[in-house]
Amino acid sequence: MTAETRVVIRAPDHLGDAVMALPGIWSLTALGPTVVHTRGRWARELYAGLEVRDGDDVPDSAGLAVMFKPSWHASRVWRHLPTIGIGPRWRYRKTLVPQLEHRRDGYARIVLAAGAAAPGPAVFSPRGVRSPLPERFVALNPWTPTRTARWRGFSALAAALDVPTIAFCGPGEGEVVRAELAGVTVLEALPLADLAASLAGCAVFVSNDSGAAHFAAACGAPVVMVHGSTASETTGVGVGVERPERLWCQPCYRKSCGWGTPCLAVDVATVLAAVRTIWGRGASPP
């Protein structure tokens, strides 16, 4: 692989997966000029400094193509390229066998197979404008469009916390979050760099399994992640919290559930204990 090799990357379209892939993407840039293809609206902020193109823009040629997005359609439209990815046999020019592993470890395997250095942890370093917030606070990320990952205990958790509490949410989510968390300050649709700066005083970031949680961890915030249809050993970050005993169907990673999402029966007290442990090493927050 020479310095002139043109590297094209099909990055994930969801923020959480993109953050997990971020160290690998930066590692691949050492192999040559790099272009990142994705449909994520946050992509130019997350990949600041790299050339970013729309995910539907298929490259004509490349010295190396890397497929982080596990999509049959993406693999078909990129099959004319020397692509490396994980999947069934012969799916890509160089196909890696699927394993039971954390998603970030799968991305690391792809990077190593491409000849790049082993990626480290996900880190997002740009900092923008910090919102006027308390010096130290607990952050809540109560909303996700995925019903099987949307824990319903955030309102009770906010009521039980006797420390400054701030809620963060994405574009168009403010109304539903304010209705759920009455009396809690809600910050909506912050640019990634401003969100990173605003998390400077975050002592604990409590979230569903979502992109915001992975991004908060990449900014250095301690994370408590509540799992329902997902599992900490495959997509988690920080401290994972789930129901006392897993159901036969967990984890399923489905977007809908015909049984009323019993996987999300996670006690508020369990999450509160995890928050207090991080805040004060087992003591109640002052």
Image: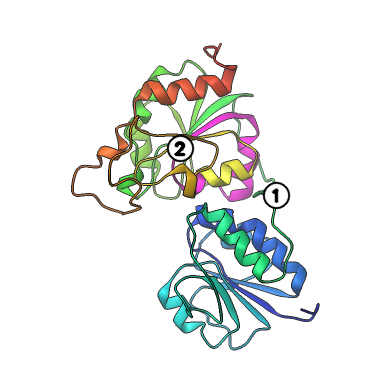
Magenta-span inclusion, residue 85: no
Magenta-span inclusion, residue 200: yes
Question: Residue 168 bears which disc, if any?
Answer: none
- 235 vs 197, nearest the viewer: 235
- In the rendered image, residue 79, in percent from the top left (x then y), is placed at 51, 85
Q: Local crowd at mark 2 within 10 Å, few (<14), some, or many (≥20)? A: many
Residue depicted at x 51% and y 53%:
101
- 186 vs 224, nearest the viewer: 224
Q: Between label 2 and label 1, give the one nearer the viewer.
A: 2
Residue for badge 2: 207
Question: Residue 126 bears which disc, if any?
Answer: 1
Q: Which residues are magenta?
A: 190-212
User: In the figure, 271 relative to 104: above or below?
Assistant: above
- In the rendered image, residue 58, in percent from the top left (x then y), is placed at 53, 82
Asked which quadrant contains residue 174, the reply is: top left
- Cα distance, mark 2 to mark 1? 22 Å
